[in-house]
Amino acid sequence: MNTNDVTATDIVIYHNPECGTSRNALALIRNSGLEPHVIEYLKTPPSRTMLVQLIERAGLTPRQLLREKGTPFAELGLGDESLDDEAILDAMMEHPILINRPLVVTPLGVRLCRPSEVVLDILPQSQQGAFAKEDGEQVVDAAGQRVR
């Protein structure tokens, strides 16, 4: 792939600006010199069809994309392992906060970027310089190489 051909429409982040992990993933995308299409999914949730496609492309199950912390997970009884995928998807459509984030789509794949540096696995361009997460953890060195 010619990375010069990558445009903002080729990189999509389902983002929550209140989430540090999501902010770090967005910053890592930008640190590669790309400006993604940012979808604040709490304001503009994906359609059910799109959500199912994202889950499948990321190699996840609906339950694996389900967020517990800071959501109505417990009140809705979503910990019940007998609930099928359709019931979980129904809950996510009704309460988008239940969709874990950030989900990032690039020409190289779809990933739930938790931790945020997972995004490095699917970015079509290298990092342009050093990067540290908001908490100070160094993720990329000055040469643009991932710190393991």
Image: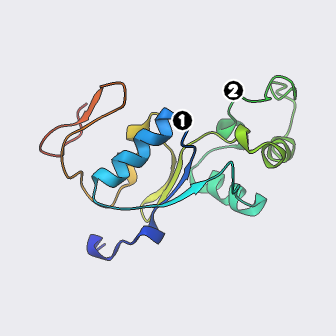
Residue 84 in the image: state x and y as whole percent: 85, 40
Residue 103 in the image: state x and y as whole percent: 55, 48
SS type, badge 2? loop
Dividing the image into 4 quarters, which one contains the N terminus?
Answer: bottom left
Residue 109 in the image: state x and y as whole percent: 47, 58
Q: Residue at x 77, y 58 (%)?
A: 48
Q: Is residue 49 shown above or below 60?
A: below
Dividing the image into 4 quarters, which one contains the C terminus?
Answer: top left
SS type, badge 1? loop
- How far separated are the C-alphas under marks 1 and 2? 11 Å
Q: Is residue 87 visible?
A: yes
Q: Residue at x 56, y 37 (%)?
A: 18
Disc 1 crowd rating (10 Å Cα; few below 14, some 14-19, many 20+) is few
Question: Which residue is situated farthest in the left direction here?
Answer: 143
Residue 69 in the image: state x and y as whole percent: 67, 25
The quarter holding residue 135 reads top left
Q: Residue at x 83, y 42 (%)?
A: 91
Q: Nearer the viewer, residue 121 or 143?
A: 143
**Left or right: 42 as drawn, with respect to 3:** right
Residue type at mark 2? Gly
Q: Nearer the viewer, residue 62 or 12?
A: 12
Q: Is residue 114 visible?
A: no
Q: Which mark is residue 130?
A: none
Discs 1, 2 touching: Cβ within 8 Å: no
The quarter holding residue 138 reads top left
The residue under label 1 is: 19
Disc 2 crowd rating (10 Å Cα; few below 14, some 14-19, many 20+) is few
Q: Is residue 56 shown above or below 91?
A: below
**Left or right: 110 as drawn, with respect to 117:** right
Residue type at mark 1? Cys
The residue under label 2 is: 70
